[in-house]
Image: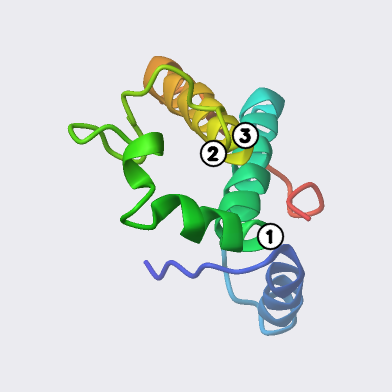
Amino acid sequence: MRVLHRTAESCRELLATATASCERITIMAFKVELEPEFVELFTEFLERFENVFDADWDVTKSRLDSGFISYFIHESGTFLDPQVDDEFSNWACRGSLLEAYRKLKCRLEDHEKSLVHWRTCSIDEAD
């Protein structure tokens, strides 16, 4: 048995070709659906990540400068766990990123098996 990964359109073409040549084929189609809550959490995290590490990069670099980093990350902390009293103080973008990161991580840990739903569908539904 040969398994091919194809788009719905290429499956239609394959079916037409096989029908014309009298080949016997079986096509199984799957549709992946992500929970809306997960998509929302991931989108929020990605937007905040891009803000800290792209749009606000000059501020991020200044906060990570060796002369100032101790104000934003305790010596025993890390970027993701800075161990400071106020993660938003003088660096609101970082605080927002950490907040989004923790929400997404919590959601993944609590419901990792229920985030993606597979279901069989017809070729037309797989588009």
- Say what amino acid the circle numbered 1 marks: Ala
Residue 55 is labelled as 1
Camera-near label (1 vs 3) is 3
**Do callouts 1 and 2 mark residues in contact (Cβ within 8 Å)?**
no
Q: How far apart in space, not on screen, are marks 1 and 2 (Cα)?
A: 12 Å
Residue 12 appears left or right of 70: right
Residue at 48%, 20% (x, y): give it: 86
Kind of element beneath mark 1: helix
**Quarter residue 13 falls in:** bottom right
Q: Nearer the viewer, residue 12 or 127?
A: 127
- Say what amino acid the circle numbered 3 marks: Ala
Q: How far apart in space, not on screen, are marks 3 and 2 (Cα)?
A: 5 Å
Q: How far apart in space, not on screen, are marks 1 and 3 (Cα)?
A: 13 Å
Which residue is disc 2 drawn over?
Answer: 94
Tell me: residue 67, above or below residue 25: above
Tell me: residue 117, above or below residue 12: above
- Say what amino acid the circle numbered 2 marks: Arg
**Do callouts 3 and 2 mark residues in contact (Cβ within 8 Å)?**
yes
Which residue is disc 3 drawn over?
Answer: 92
Kind of element beneath mark 2: helix
Residue 79 rendering spot, x and y as whole percentages: 35, 41
Residue at 73%, 51% (x, y): give it: 126
Q: Nearer the viewer, residue 93 or 75?
A: 75
Q: Nearer the viewer, residue 1 or 68?
A: 68
Q: Is residue 124 visible?
A: yes
- Lower sequence index among marks 1 and 2: 1
**Do callouts 1 and 3 mark residues in contact (Cβ within 8 Å)?**
no
Callout 3: 10 Å neighbours few (<14), some, many (20+)?
A: few
**Quarter residue 59 falls in:** bottom right
